[in-house]
Amino acid sequence: MLVDNAIVIVENVYRYMEQGVPRITAAMKATSEVAYPVIGSTLTTLAAFFPMIFWPGIMGEFMKYLPITLVITLFSSLVVALVINPALCAYFIKVSGNGDNKTMDADTISEAGEKPIEIKGVLLNSYYRLMRNALDQRLIVMAMAFIILFILFQIWMFYVGAEKAVEFFPPIDPKDAYVNVEMPEGADLEYIDRIMKKIEIAITGHAGDTNDPEKFKIEDYSTAYTTQSHETLRGDKFMGPSDLPNVMHIYTKSVETTGSSIFEQNSPNHIGVQFLDFEDRITPSVADLDKIRNRVKYIPGAQITVQEAQEGPPTGSPINIEISGDDFQTLGQISRQVREILQNIPHVMDIQDDYTEGIPSIQITIDRQKAALFDLSTNWIGHTLKTAFNGLDVSTYREHDEDFDITVTFGESDRKKAVVLKKLMILSPAGLLVPLTTIADIKYSGSLGDIVRINHERVVTVKANVDETKIPGPVARQQAEDHLKSFAMPSGYKTKFTGEFEDQQESEAFLTRAFAIALFLIFLILVTLFNSVTQPLIIMTSVILSLGGAFLGLTIIQSPFGVIMSGVGVISLAGVVVNNAIVLIDYTNKLVARGFAVSDAVISAGATRLRPVILTAITTVLGLLPMVTGVSYDFHRMAISYTSDATQWWQSMSIVVIFGLIVATFLTLVVVPVLYSLFNSMKVGGQNLLDAIGRWYWWPVHYWVGESVQTR
């Protein structure tokens, strides 16, 4: 898009020079001829992207840099095209003259204007014949254009949309993954370390058959990290820690106390898995993630989930259910039931919630009356319990120059057993040993965990991922909604689907409004530019018809319509399509004003603008091809790269623009002239009809007036 304005102006200057116009005069006259349509076309493109600057939320923070960058660069390209390019053309472009060209001065051009391009050559003659036939069958051409749009949309719906019509973001092959481990509350570091080592060994592939708990054996931890040889897509050898071909590094983080949300992509206790670079992978890293899930899902003692590192803005999980109510323990019970429901839905995985029961505790309630019978105070009983479990320094032991504390406490094994409390004896002031159970009531309980509030309500969130290679996320979410409809929710408690679903709805609503505002702004600019309503309608019709190319491209790559990327592509396409149509219609109007017949004007204008329209399409397509194919030049390695992880992000947007522009090029050169001719005929026909109605309406008046004159 950056070179579109320059192409139009430079090509027009070159065409003037071909007709014998001096270089400086050609640069001035050619630039002034297309200045207004070029400015108008740039404004329409800016209008297409301008509403996206106000994208709300986290998604807006992620995407707003695209429209801001485009607005600044397109405005800069307009200044360069209008100011710098004409001067460069006047200085550098030299057209070798031929005998047929005569030098024209400025007065000649002002009086007669430049000449439309001469119809000669295979391409222009073919275009001339095509346009003559199209103008003879205008209604058929327009009907075919809309029928083709409908057919292309139906083909996309049949092959792609029937299974998954819309996606929020395209699926991305992850660079990293996290095996998150939620430990039981109160687990000590030794227990945590033992579980983490089991998971590490499973990931490395040294734990035997991990799908069968009976065959799952944990070997010596040190032997699990025997490196294995692998080969990258480029043929390079490397030593990896796992039998999985894409795993480059494995690292572990274990902590005893946690203070962050378990919904973070890397929880406090996690094992990180780093994959090869995208261009080095022989197989997708998603396949390795599935194998890791199968290897760790039978390991007992903790809740294990596998989470791929999130690329782009945080959008939540495909299934994200917020359960709100007053009682926190009731919310925990409901969340467990919801998790059981989700487990029965095929291809739903990594189910978890953020409900925490708190650290298990033991409450010892002293019966003061019974304790008083033995002359025991609560302070003394508490001191005894503290000594038993925390220890009491009674003396010191000196060895050489160091002092060591002598601490009286229970043995380590007894301190880990709650049953010893029932055997604990309290020494009374009278020297009697009184069982703790005689003077106190011992109860096992748990404290409240972290309580999350949203809009002043207590909320527990249940989230899950979906294997979208087997079932689309929206389908799985709809199944979850259907299952929850039959779930008897207690009074005062409710569920709400949020996460990716909520973000998608918000983005869809914004992009719909942005597209409507963009169309309105484009239409307003076109009405101002042409001082007409029908001609902007012609251009807007070509924008709608160009969507057929977008659906064709999505069908070829078997891609659903991406709310973000495909949506941005459609808005971009609208701006580009309008540009060529503006220049074409503006030149057609000038030829009609010179006295050309409408049919001759549309053909001459189309033939004259054929070269810049095709050049614009070719440069745009070539500029977007690396985003589609991944072929680019790696300046770091000084080599050609045939794959790129950026392709995963931008492919659908690029495909929409490329195929939409290919179709739009045909529309600009054929359908727009046909519509121009058709609307002109309707205008002339309407005017003739109004004249006929006026003559019929005023005929009695003229008749009686004429009779009275004759009578006199």
Image: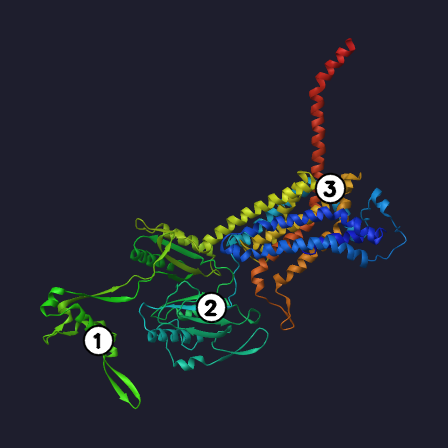
Q: Residue furthest bottom?
A: 400
Question: How many residues crowd mark 1 within 10 Å: few (<14), some (14–19), many (20+)?
Answer: some
- Residue 390 seen anywhere in this rendered image of the structure: yes
Q: Say which quadrant the N terminus sits in.
A: bottom right
Question: How many residues crowd mark 2 within 10 Å: few (<14), some (14–19), many (20+)?
Answer: many
Q: Secondary structure at mark 2?
A: strand
Asked if labels 3 and 1 touch by Cβ distance under 8 angstroms, the answer is: no
The x, y position of residue 404, in whole percent, is 28, 84
Q: Residue furthest right?
A: 99
Q: Which residue is mark 3?
A: 135
Q: Which residue is mark 2?
A: 177
Q: Is residue 372 left or right of residue 601?
A: left
In front: label 1 or label 3: 1
Compared with 228, 443 (above or below) is: above
In front: label 3 or label 2: 2
Q: Which residue is mark 1?
A: 388
* N-terminal-most mark, 1 or 2: 2
The x, y position of residue 700, in whole percent, is 70, 16
Compared with 554, 232 (above or below) is: below
Label 1 vs label 2: CA separation? 44 Å
Compared with 213, 24 (above or below) is: above
In front: label 1 or label 2: 1
The residue at 31%/49% (across/down) is 492
Asked if labels 2 and 1 touch by Cβ distance under 8 angstroms, the answer is: no
Question: How many residues crowd mark 3 within 10 Å: few (<14), some (14–19), many (20+)?
Answer: many
**Residue kind at label 2, given as amino acid type:** Ala
**Residue kind at label 1, given as amino acid type:** Ala
Q: Secondary structure at mark 1?
A: helix
Name the one closer to the observer, 620 or 407: 407
Q: Is residue 312 left or right of residue 689?
A: left
- Residue 132 seen anywhere in this rendered image of the structure: no
